[in-house]
Image (cartoon, helix red, strand yellow):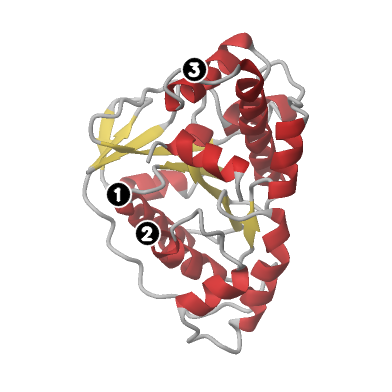
């Protein structure tokens, strides 16, 4: 499914603890990793060593690609082997779920063998996100000693922005080129058949999501890893644009996970990992 179509459907419908024993890191799937700044091809071990030095990393996925979730699971398990992990944030979690996330993290201290299905139920995991796709990375992060944090808007906030569109302030995010690029993607996902008022509302929601993610990433303990859809991760239209508006002096590194045939350039990401 097109990532923006999924966002549209979601928009219109529905603390540190004692360390747990972590499983051995999974083997990363195949594919080609490119440093977009130099054009060099990297091995997974080279990539992880570079990312380990960065205070904030955004990983952009295609939501329904299993290889991307395998890479995320590998990152979550491998990065703490090179330095302490400060936090992991996920687009798939909302503020309303954060108390449940914290409770489950504490509960797992005395129930380390809890099954993923039990965790999903206690988290009130949203059905719009395919749990079998996300269970491994969520289980790895929620059993870890660092916080697992929400990075999205609540549904009530989404509906409020839909009914009364409001755009975040900032010269970078309000740039006409940024807004038109996002609007063009929305039009494409609707086969160019969308009313101006609905387009404006969905544009506001998309940018408010990006602003929330930027704010949460800036507030999260470092080193922080943010897992989001690829469009949110893009340097030229997504969360990094809002980081410039909120705290322009802070840096962020973008790893884009892309399928074969999808073009990603250095204006959009620092690294790209092309998978089947």
Q: How crowded is mark 1: few (under 14 residues within 10 Å), some or many (20 or more)?
A: many
Residue 151 disc label: none
Point out residue 169 in the picture as x, y percentages from the top left corner: 77, 23
Can residue 154 be seen?
Answer: no
Taking depth in this image into account, of 97 and 257 the one nearest to the observer is: 97
Q: Earlier in the sequence, mark 3 or mark 2?
A: 2
Quadrant for the C terminus in the image: top left
**Cα gap from disc 3 to disc 1, whole angstroms:** 34 Å
**Badge 2 element:** helix
Query: For this view, does 223 lie left or right of residue 136?
Result: right
Q: Mark 1 points at which residue?
A: 44
Which quarter of the figure is the N terminus placed in? top left
What residue did someone put label 3 on? 184
Rendered location of residue 71, percent (x, y): 35, 53
Considering only vertical position in the picture, is 51 above or below 221?
above
Q: Residue at x 46, y 43 (%)?
A: 59
Identify the residue at image location x=48%, y=32%: 231
Residue 242: tell me if it is visible. yes
Vertical comparison of 192 with 106: above or below:
above
Q: Mark 3: which secondary structure?
A: helix
- Looking at this view, name the residue that lies furthest to the bottom: 110
Judged by depth in the image, the label closer to the viewer, 3 or 1, is: 3
Horizontally, residue 254 falls left or right of residue 265, namely right
- Spot the residue most to the top: 176
Choose the circle earlier in sequence order: 3 or 1: 1
Mark in front: 3 vs 2: 3
* Residue beneath disc 2: 74
Q: From mark 2 to mark 1, how far is it between C-alphas?
A: 10 Å
């Amino acid at each position: 499914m097109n990532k923006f179509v999924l966002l549209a459907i979601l928009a219109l419908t529905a603390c540190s603890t004692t360390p747990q024993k972590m499983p051995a890191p999974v083997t990363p799937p195949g594919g080609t990793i490119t440093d977009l700044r130099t054009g060099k091809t990297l091995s997974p071990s080279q990539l992880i060593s570079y990312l380990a030095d960065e205070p904030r990393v955004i990983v952009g996925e295609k939501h329904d690609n299993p290889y991307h979730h395998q890479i995320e699971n590998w990152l979550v398990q491998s990065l703490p082997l090179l330095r302490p992990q400060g936090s992991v944030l996920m687009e798939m979690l909302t503020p309303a779920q954060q108390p449940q996330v914290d409770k489950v993290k504490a509960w797992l201290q005395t129930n380390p063998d809890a099954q993923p299905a039990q965790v999903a139920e206690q988290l009130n995991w949203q059905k719009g996100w395919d749990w079998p796709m996300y269970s491994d990375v969520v289980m790895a992060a929620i059993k870890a000693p660092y916080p697992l944090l929400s990075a999205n808007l609540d549904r009530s906030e989404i509906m409020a922005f839909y009914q009364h569109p409001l755009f975040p302030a900032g010269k970078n995010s309000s740039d006409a080129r940024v807004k038109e690029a996002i609007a063009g993607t929305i039009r494409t996902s609707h086969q160019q058949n969308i009313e101006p008022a609905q387009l404006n509302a969905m544009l506001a929601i998309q940018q408010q999501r990006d602003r929330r993610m930027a704010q949460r990433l800036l507030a999260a303990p470092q080193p922080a890893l943010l897992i989001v859809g690829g469009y949110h991760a893009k340097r030229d239209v997504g969360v990094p644009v809002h980081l410039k508006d909120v705290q322009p002096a802070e840096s962020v590194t973008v790893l884009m996970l892309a399928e074969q045939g999808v073009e990603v350039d250095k204006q959009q990401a620092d690294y790209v990992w092309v998978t089947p």
